[in-house]
Every structure is written in C-alpha cells, then in structure tokens.
Image (cartoon, rainbow, N blue to C red):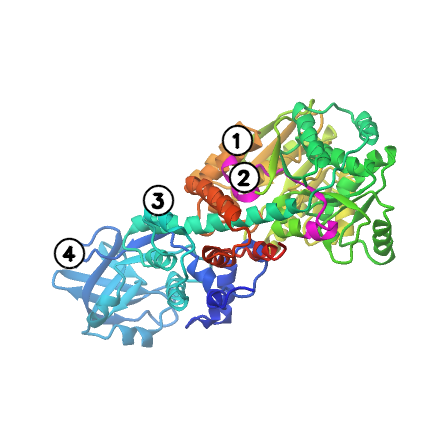
Amino acid sequence: MRASLLDRYFASATGVRGVGPRLAKLFAKLLRPASDGQADDARLIDLVFHLPSGVIDRSWRPLIADLPRQGIVTVRLTVGRHRPPPPHNQRVPYRVECFDDTGSLVLAFFHAYPDYLKKVLPEGAERYISGAIDWYGGLPQMVHPDHIVPPEEFSQLPRIEPVYPATAGVSQKVLGKAIRAALDQVPALPEWHDAALMAQHRWPAFSAALHALHHPAGADVLDTGSAPRQRLAYDELLSGQLALSLIRRDMKRSRGRPVAGTGDKRAKILAQLPYSLTRSQEAAIADVLRDMASGERMLRLLQGDVGSGKTVVALMALVTATEAGSQAAFMVPTDILARQHFANLGPLGEAAGVRIALLTGREKGRVRDDILQRLEAGDIDIVVGTHALFQSEVSFRDLALVVIDEQHRFGVHQRLAVQAKSGGHAHVLVMTATPIPRTLTLTIYGDMDVSRLTEKPAGRQPVDTRAMPLERLAEVVDGIGRAMATGARVFWVCPLVEDTALVELTAAEQRFAALEQRFPGAVGLVHGRMKGAEKDRTMARFQAGEISVLVATTVIEVGVDVPEATVIVIENAERFGLAQLHQLRGRIGRGAERSTCILLYQGPLGEMARARLKTLRETDDGFVIAEEDLRLRGAGELLGTRQSGMPGFRLADPLAHGDLLQVARKDSEAFLMRDPQLKSARGETLKLLLYLFGRDDAVRLLSAG
C-alpha cells in the first residue's frame, strides 16, 4: 500500500483551482508518461514533475523612447484611447493607445473582447505592461501582452518567469498557474538520501528543489548541473536502479534449474539454414546456452542491429528448451510479427520434430481453446505470440524459457508476468533491434546481462541511402516504375503527421490512391486500423509478389521480413527520429540484391533534421546511429516519446547525469545488501521514493521475501 503521505501527489489535477476535466485531460496527454497508457486525468505529481525548459526575464524596464527592436520588456504606461476595429472586419486588431513622458506605444488585440479590455485598461489609468515588443509602420507596438497589472499589483508580476514545454490548447499562463498551485498543495517529504551525500553535493531538500526550479531566480537554476536539478535527477535515477536491483534479485531468487539440450535438434535446424552463423551469433548462443545450463536463472538482453540475426539466436535457445523436454514461449509486440515468425520458424521446427503453435488476440473460439489445452498438456513445444501469451487463462505444463522480442515495447511488468507463468523458474532472454546507446543501457536494462550482435550475416549488401526534396516526387515515382519493371518490390512509408492515427491513415490512403492510379493493381495498403485478416492478406500478396508496392504506416517498422524488397521510400523523413528511420531502412537489404532507401523530405530542413538525414546517409551501424540520436535529441526526448514506448525520464538527463547514474547504481546495491527488505528508517523513505516514481511493482517484490 502506498503511504498516505503521497496521496496528494497522486490526486487528480482537477483538485487544482481553475483545472476542470477538459484541462486535466489535455494535461494528461502532455504530462503523463507513456507507460501510463491512455490516462484520463493528469495528477498533481505530473504537474510538479513538469520542469521548465527556459525562462523569460521581465526585469528590463525601459522608457518608450528606449525600446529595443525586439525582446521582452516591462513598461509603465498611461492608458489612452481605445480604437475598436471596423464592424465585421476581424482582420483588423483592437488597438489601445498608451504613452509615457517619452513617447507612445500601441497595444494590439485580435478577436478581442472590448468589455474585458475596457475593464483591465481603463482610459487614464496607469498600468505595467509586459510582453514582446514589435514594430509596425515604424512605431512600437505590443501584440497580446503577457501581463497587464495596476501599480499596486506590480510586486506580483514575475521578474523571472519559467517557460514550460506545452501542447495545443494549453497556454503558458494556464499551465504555469496550475503547476504553481499544485506545488503549493503537495506536502514536504522526509529525506531518503544519505546526509553525507547531501552535504557533499550541497543538494537542497526534495520540496526545496522543486520550488527552486518552478520559481527560478535565473536561467542558471535550470541547468542540468545546478544543485536543485541534480538533486531531482538523482532521485529519479536512484528509484530506477533500486527497482532494477529488486527485480533482478527476485528473478534470481529461485534457483534456476539447469536446462541443457542434446544439440540434436539444433544441429538439424542449423543444417537447413542457407548461411553460416557469424562469430557474434555463435558467441551470443554460447552465452545463452551457458546461462540456461547453469544453476542460475538466465536474465539476458540480446542487442542486435537490424538484420543482425537475433531470431536465429532465439531459435537455438527455444529449441534447447525443447531438447530438455520442456516448453518455451516467444513473445513479440505485434500480430504481424508473430505471424511472420510463426511462418518462418514453422518449417524449421517441423524438420527437427519441434511442435510450434501461434497464439495472439486473434485466435478465437475452438481454435484458441485447442491451443490452450495443448499448451497445458505439453503437446506444444514452442508457442509464438503477442502479449496474449501472458493472460490469466494461458497455462503451460513446463515453461522453461521465455524470449521477449522488442523488449522496449513491453516493460518491466511483462518480466514479472513471466515469473507468474513459470512458477518463478523460467529463463528469460529479451531482445531488441533498437540499439540502445551504451550510456543508457544501464538505465533500462540494469537488471540484465548483455550480449551484442555486431556483424551482419554474410551476403548482406549495404543500402544506398539518398535524401531528396518532395519537389522531386515525380522523379521518385518514375524510378519506382523502372525498378518494378525489373521485378523489384517497394515499401512506401507515410509519416505520423500529428499525434493522431487518423491523420497518419489519411496520408497513407492518399498516397495509396495516387500510386494505384499510376500502377493499377500493383499497389497494396497496410495500416494499424485495418482488421488483422485484411492486413495478413495484403502482406501475403506483397511477400508472394502479387503486388509490387506496399504503402504502409510505421506498422512495418519492426521485424517485417521480405527479402525481395529492395527499395523503401520514406515520405516526410524529416518528421521521423533517427533510430526510427534506421529501423524502417532495415526492412530492405535483407537479400543478395543491392537496395536503395529514398528519404523524401519537405524543405526547408531544420538543423537537427539535416543532421539526422546526413547521419543516415553516412552510416548503417545502428549503435553509431543510436549514440548520434542521443547526442542530437537528448535522453529525455529519445526515451520519452510515446511512440517509442521506452521508459522515459522526467527529471534526469542520463547524458548529462551519467556520473550520478553510476553513483545511484552503487548506492542501491550497497543499501540492499545492508537492508534487503527496506525496513530501516531510510529503507521506509526509499519506499516513498519508489512509489513517487511509479515503481510500485518493485515495492510489491519486497513482500516476496
């Protein structure tokens, strides 16, 4: 049970004055982490953890004669004549003429409410006005000032005002006011850090650090190296490392039974492969088989770039479990990928006498019941599926190994679900084709041993990557026509234009219609809103060569394997992240033919978009790309986007706070050695820290002993 002391932190933001249900929903979209899914309301903790990205300095108070050409100023004025726009002409602003002893200044308001303006700006009154200065026809003006206050309220005008990352429908003023009100409502908390550490770094208390950042005395307070910022970053990093340590301890607690195969089935499968294993594949298989055969439970991460051959490593592990007379599960993030793996692994397993089944949310009725009965009876050796594998009605006779693909799309709670299904005994191998920068591996996978695949299988051709402006779209379509004439197959990826699947879908449908008109009967469409069977049919036609062009949304990002596809066009490539572009490019270059990736961009390009496209043209090494992505975007954006599904950081920047991450790792391990159940006085406060950062699952593990 979460301590009652934290109740206010987790209360709905609707308890803040001025925040109704509509605003609370908008705040939730902006503020709640991706791991919360589609949360209804923001909470007070979401508001106070939303740190400013900069400040506005309102301390400059020039006379009108000394106004700059641009910038934020605060001026003391006398209000003059109001000049409403002509009737029925909303394009002309409502103007209020103001003056001081040195000149005049116009305040301009579009779509104004005259009664309100006459109330806050009565003629003849003195007012302090703060906002961005502008010039129109050689005269100074201020359009929609940020603040209008009478002299007696001047002390309430913020000299240094924080600026927050915001979203459509939420103004800075409304967001800032809600955050400061929330900060006044949440209670101070007892200290969970060691006094010597606090003194060494001169860190303020938790509440004082939050107040310092939301009421900044200057821009330097927001720097990643400031004491308040470091204090809060360490809180978040320590909570993460504590949680990972507890999970690792729990996974390792039950002595893993040795699972060692005879090697017979593995040999039969390897003999069927049309290629030999790379050195790093052989090394990774050796790591996995050694872990499985030991008395310790395996908890290993397999990192491999796009096309590096992770699936073969997984298959060797899965088959080893069946050689030992046990069962294995292979969990993947999407239905498309589950069916593809089942189609690819089925023939290999059949030749080796391994019984493989498929279980996703789409298996219904008698088919599903039959699979569940066979799993429970032990008549299925390996089951491939989505998260449906860990629903309550799914039982195994003897689950010895679980492989989880694209781990970042699931989360720590799936690792705990694995525990329940296996009675705490199964070995766990998690895989990702999204290269994680070395800097961040510890923050996400600190509870795991790591193997890396660093080579591509023999015969893979490098992908020729080109960037072209959208104005050359007609040339690209002509080029596709020439490629199709040689038998090539083409992916055409449409972007997520806004944070809505509907707009993404519209873009894909429009591109499909245009290409279908040019190449009648040769184009297919796949998107996330299609029914599964319809998606399968289109994918199957593309794989069989019945259609040559597949227009798709990013549903094809992970794992789709069509070796005959040699061209991919990524439309509006400037809208994608670097790692996602690399993932999409990985859909081609899987066969022996040369492949081409065309990045269609809408100019003019910003500096970051230009750097992303340049990096992609220059390298196909996913780990180099991941490090560059981290450098360009920072860890907060890299891990915090809802699209990535990765655990984001709200207060820490692992790139800037890497030294604190190492300290947090050591601190959590050392403390758990002394107080494994967190029962001491400091241990109880550390439980508060875990709850504060949403690590409830880790706290529950303490009750397991």
Looking at marks 3 and 4 on the same chain, the residue that comes earlier in the sequence is marked by 4
First of labels 1, 2 by sequence position: 2
Q: What residue is disc 1 on?
A: 624
For label 3, the residue is: 225
Classify the position of the N terminus by image quarter. Answer: bottom right
Label 3 or label 2, whichever comes before in sequence order: 3
Magenta region: which residues?
417-446
Quadrant (top left/top right/bottom left/bottom right) for the C terminus: bottom right
- Tell whether position 429 is magenta: yes
Task: Identify the mark nearer the N-term, 1 or 3.
Answer: 3
Q: Is residue 641 visible?
A: no
Q: Is residue 144 left or right of residue 551?
A: left
Q: Are marks 1 and 4 in contact (CB under 8 Å)?
A: no
Secondary structure beneath label 4: helix
219 lies above or below 285: below
Cβ–Cβ under 8 Å for marks 1 and 2? no
Residue 461 lies in the magenta-colored region: no
Residue at the spot of label 4: 65
Mark 1 or mark 2: which is in front?
2
Amino acid under label 1? Answer: Val
Q: Which residue is mark 2?
A: 441
On screen, residue 284 versus residue 273, left or right, reads left
**Mark 1 and mark 3: Cα distance apart in space:** 26 Å
- Crowding at dot 4, Cα within 10 Å, few <14 / some 14-19 / many 20+, comes out as few
Residue type, label 2: Thr
- Marks 3/2: CA distance? 22 Å
